Image (tube, coloured by chain):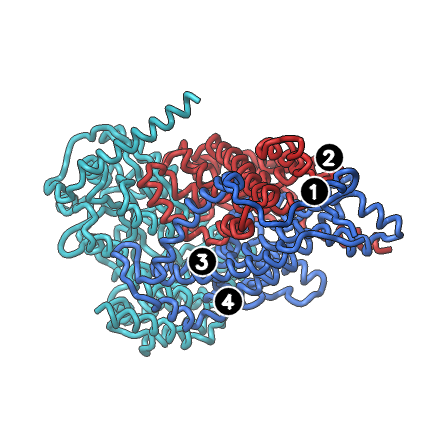
Chain colours: A blue, B cyan, C red
Amino acid sequence: MTTVQAGRGPILAAARPSQGAPRWRPQPLLFASPAVLLVVGLLYAPFVWTAYLSFTSYDGLNPPQWTGLANYIGFFRDGILWVTVSNTLMWVAGTILLPVGLGLFVATVTYRSRWGTLLRLPFLIPYAVSGAGVAVVWGFVLQPHGALNEVLAFLHLPGGHASLLANRPVNTVVMIVASTWQQVGVNALLFLVGLQSIPEAPLEAARLDGADGWRLFRYITWPLLRPLTAVVVGLAIVASLKTFDVVWVLTQGGPGRSSETLAVTMYRDTFVANEYGTGSTVAVVLTVIAGIASVLYLRGQLSSRRTVEW
Amino acid sequence: MGSYTRLLLAAALAGALATAACGSSSNPSAAPTTVPTGKTGGETLSLYNDKGQWKQFFTDIGALSKTQVGSDLNPVGYTDENTYQAFIKASLRTKVKPDLFTWATGGELNSLASQHVLADTSALWKDAIGKGYLSQQLEPYYTVDGKQYCVPLNVAYWGMFYNKHVFAKYNLQPPKTWSDFTTILSTLKAGGVTPMYQTSTLFTFVWFEQLLAGSNPDVYNALSTGKAKYTDQAVVDTMKLWQSEEAAGYFTDPTVKDQPQALLEKGGDGGVAMVPFGTWFNTSMTAEGQKPGVDYGFFVIPNVNPALPKTSMVFETGPLCELASAPHLVDSLRVMNWWLTPDAQQKWAGSRDDVSANPKATISDPALQEVAAAAGSGQYNIVDRYFEAAPPPVLTAALDAFGAFMVKPSTYMDQLNTIQKAADQYWATNK
Amino acid sequence: MGRVVTRAIFAVLWLIWLAPVYLLVVNAFRSTDEYAHASIWSPPHHFGLWANFVAAYHSAGLGGSLYSTALYAVVAPAIAVVVGALAGYAIIALRLRHGFAWFVLVFGGSIFPIQMLVIPLFVGYAHLDLYDHRPGLILIYTAVSVPLAAFIMRNFFTGISYSIYEAAVMDGASSWRIFYRIYLPLATTACAAIFILEFTFIWNDLLFGLTLSQSDSVRPVMTALSSLLSLYAGTTYNIVLAAMLFLSLPTMALFLCTQRLFARGLSLGQIG
């Protein structure tokens, strides 16, 4: 067995890292402290206010009134809960499936290709476009008698005359497609970083053993991509749980709240209905879910050291 | 490095100044009881607004303000009304305060006024009404507990914009009665033209408001005071009428993403023949390059119920406000006072091709001039726009419910029950 | 065989991705007159792009400062990359105690819904005199960029052989020196990827720029763009798209300039 991160050559012979608990040294923390301070000071601190508001009734103007757990009880009894949670879960599943899967596909196909830049360009352009632009372009595509309807009708596929943004769950599905259009390029870029960090040695050895194409990818590339796969999937989980922009610009969660996600519900309650307490409750629930999901995922992905047998 | 030090110094200085400004104006009761006249000290006043797209109009009127009263205006535009309101409310707790800011009438104005954070503009109103710059009819929208706050930023009457080319093709005239109007709808539909625009985002209340105010204005008004229920027969009948029109295919798909001005310009060519909106929609139409009176026109929608004495017309007005703790308290009042003059209003309404709160300002578009004049002379039964009339929690529920109705018109009763549930909750705690 | 199928699928995807891009470009080029009646798919007959951009510039006043926007979009990600790399280095190479917990703390900064942060941030900024100052905006843009940077750098560094670190320590190099002479240079592509992503995010951001500044010299340029879509005096879509196309040029240029970095491989095990 050889650990990949050990590479080869003389360094391999160097002493393994001592496994005993390292002595307390202030220096590592010093290196991490700018990141910790920035994040805690500018992102955690404001959220404390939101967390406090979730236990109050507040309209943004009169002083907040402490109401204990009333908002939380109300949230779990709200009839919209099922709609908004199931929509959000569709976003999570859809985002891991489509933008992540296609991002990996685009990265592996274009990596080391002579025309790599050109081949990747259509996938990168959408990311450069601002949210307002995505709204306009996908408005063209998704609206009644829009471009997607035309294409479906032309191909004699079902949905040619459907109103794609009108009903659950189709409206959420088509918005996931719109979001995929924008996100694939980012994921492809991150997978490229991962592909580049894979050493030549295991690939060459596997090729000598006769592995190629799918087998090479499945048994060598895929396991070695794991650090960056963890990044892409970890980011996708968090981002999809917080899905807001695309939905807000295309349907504002409607018609009749049918396409709301948790983040849209949060925004609607806070800023549209002026019920900061209720909105903050959704924000806290959302944050807790995102926190638990990412810790569970990352602990599984990051705790074991990356080793590959070949 | 030097520039950075300067930056830090400037930051410290700005902080000190802000603190000083805060201290000097911390006594809100200093608002003058007479109208401040004369020129301002010349400082540029910030004008926070949720109408980022009006930046050029604000800049233009600021230039006029500078020459006429001495202060320029710096528009600070927001693009999202909801976060804008949250921002303004939050600014009350900080030393960052706007000189002037736009707001909404109805519940939103009441909540600020009842907190005693707004500058009293009663003297300005008295003076302006005396000079004929503002109509007495407008005063209630700006009155809380007997005092006036803010001045009108804009006013708008709601009616129907229609494509003149389409009307000419089908030999149609603006309707005088409801049956004229239904004839227009069926003629257009038979000719393959989608008669009316509707949308399931934000402006979902438009047709509900129009139909109910035109068939039973008393019930419409009573809804916003909690004295009528959304499940009352008059309201149910209105929804049935709306449902029948939806079923007849008189509306666009509510999820359409094309802009209404583009659809109205297209007319029979894949667009719509009519768009029911406020007079502010004129700005969008002229920006589209369309000519009022040639390409499109505007008519007041007839009452559903012909027995009513006056035609109901929906009215909205948005305020321009000042905080009692504004940084330039008196100068901002001077500018607000100037704002009401015919000179200022001519420029402000003219640049947007909209109507003005000042009856003495002439309006460039003859059709709108006619409507505004008729409204001013009491020819119409003016009702408040639903957006301002309904209590905020009821409005939030209703906007969603009407959107859901458009997609599935058969659910009208469910939707009314949903709205009534929100209304019951609201009126249980707010008498 | 497998290769052919793969390439065919890729070609189909490539065309699908290009279709909305095509819609975007042709409609941005259309004049307003033509836009009203032409099919959205048809190629433009008149070149209206520049006129549209000028119209957007004037009608909504694409105010804000291009200089400020560029400053935020370049400086904040640059700082964030280094700050994130330092954190990743501390956790992976320096074996920071409870490294996973510290990592979760930093990454946790990305899980908050940012719509809820802006109002308390505004209040705090007003109290600290950071409101409407460029350093204030750089600060928040850096902070929101750090979690992603730390995550990518941490995971990227797991791919670098620990023996490299140990060898350098034996040569007597300080932790700081190992960081900027060995780890940072090895992570050039990861840094570039982070920079691109954060640059684009900040360049296109509306929320923070809008809420934490008021003067045209501090406000980012993007803030005016979404106002063009408003129903009240909205601008026609061809003009919106033209403005957007222009404002996405710097991001496109950045993509194209950095693509070379992603084209060549680098083998981390070979350093030593």
Q: Residues within 10 Å of mark 1 (few under 14, many from 20)?
A: many
- Which of these two is toward me, C117 or B417? C117
Disc 3 is attached to a residue of which chain?
Answer: B
- The residue at 26%/28% (across/down) is B67
- Can marks 2 and 1 be said to lie on one chain? yes
**Which residue carries the number 1 mark?**
C161
- Can marks 1 and 4 be said to lie on one chain? no
**Which residue carries the number 4 mark?**
A85
**Which residue carries the number 2 mark?**
C272
Q: Picture coordinates of residue B24 (x, y %)? A: 17, 36
Which of the two discs, 2 and 4, sits closer to the camera? Answer: 2
- Can marks 2 and 4 be said to lie on one chain? no
Q: Decide: is B103 above or below B393.
A: above
Question: Does residue A36 appear to the left or right of C85 in the view shown?
Answer: left
Does dot 1 land on a helix, a strand or a loop? loop
- Which of these two is toward me, A144 or B328? B328
Does dot 4 land on a helix, a strand or a loop? helix
**Which residue carries the number 3 mark?**
B274
- The residue at 36%/47% (across/down) is B50
Distance from label 2 to label 4 (Cα)?
51 Å
Confirm or deny contact between disc 2 and disc 1 (CB under 8 A): yes
* Amino acid at pointer 2: Gly
Q: Decide: is A60 above or below C75.
A: below
- The residue at 42%/45% (across/down) is A42
Distance from label 2 to label 1 (Cα)?
10 Å
Distance from label 4 to label 3 (Cα)?
39 Å
Confirm or deny contact between disc 1 and disc 4 (CB under 8 A): no
Disc 4 is attached to a residue of which chain?
Answer: A
- Which of these two is toward me, C32 or B392? B392
Q: Picture coordinates of residue B22 (x, y %)? A: 22, 38
Distance from label 3 to label 2 (Cα)?
74 Å
